[in-house]
Amino acid sequence: MLGRTASNLYWLCRYMERAENMARLMDVGYRMSLTPGLDSSHRDQWESTLQAAGVAEPFFARNETANLNAIRDFMLFDESNPSSVLSCIASARSNARSVRTAITTEMWESINETWLEFTQKRRKAVLANDLPALFDWIKRNTARFRGAMLNTILRNDGFSFCQLGVFAERADNTARILDVKYFVLLPSFDLVGSEVDLRQWSMILRAASAHRSYRHFYRDRFKASNIADFLILRREMPRSLSHCYHLITQTLGDLESFYGNRYQCHDAASRVHAKLQGTDMDTIFRQGLHEFLSDFIASNNTVDVAIAEAYNFN
């Protein structure tokens, strides 16, 4: 497969995953902004969302404060923000058009319909009370695309590049959703384990669509250590870091079989996977959750760059 085709498939699926993930991050910030019991010294929840999404610098270059309307416009509709939902869907559609013969009709129709419907939405018409429904709409439509891909595309090297894009982006996002919790640390350590703390952790689970599955897995009340364990180390959870890297290393193994070559990206991904398999939550909390997540995000970026170099994306 040509490097340009592989790149388009990778980024097509990565952008669709990112559109969903931006909605998930905004959902966390929105729910936390409504959480009672936080005093005026508490860090601004919307600013924490921008920091976790990695877009704080460009946002504050254009806006003085992080209020709801400015955040809504920037993260949902701003075409100058490459990570906005509108930009992600448009970029995914552009990549899909470039590889129209390499994807199925169902995949193309799903992307095109999502783009057409979303471009009809008007930012000024989306009020605060409308945001939860809009977040759900974005998640449903990106899930529809993913279902079309999984049910119709051939299991060849093209499918492998699609899978790599999905899980590289998903791993990055799960780490960032967890990192939102770091940026909204309670104003007093006395409140750790309190109702406010537990509500925040519950929102993290809901943002990862893991609320009910967590209850099924642990069968007890919310605990920070269990929630972090579920989203980092539990391979049974499809958005966990461990699950994502299990599939990334497996998919890279498929590409090694297809092409008969092993590259630096295989070893880089294997190191990340081995680190996740070889640690536990006590070790992570001693290191510091934020420090662990920051290191993971950097390592995931390294794998992304190595994949692009190995398969001639540029």
Image (cartoon, rainbow, N blue to C red):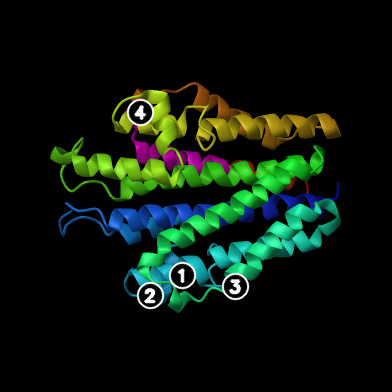
Where residue 63 is drawn, which disc sits there? 2
Which residue is at 76% across, 31% downward?
254
Disc 1 to disc 4, C-alpha distance: 33 Å
- Relative to 275, is 145 above or below? below
Q: Amino acid at mark 3?
A: Thr
Inspect this view and state whether residue 60 appears.
no
Q: Earlier in the sequence, mark 4 or mark 2?
A: 2
Q: Residues within 10 Å of mark 3 (few under 14, many from 20)?
A: some
Q: Which residue is mark 3?
A: 119
- Relative to 272, is 117 above or below? below
The spot of residue 253 in percent (x, y) is 73, 29
Q: Which residue is mark 4?
A: 226
Instruction: Point out the stretch of residues depicted in magenta.
Output: 283-301
Label pair 2/1, CB-CB below 8 angstroms: yes
Disc 1 to disc 3, C-alpha distance: 15 Å
For the residue labelled by badge 2, is the local secondary structure a helix, a strand or a loop? loop
Magenta-highlighted stretch: main secondary structure? helix
Q: Earlier in the sequence, mark 1 or mark 3?
A: 1
Disc 2 to disc 1, C-alpha distance: 10 Å
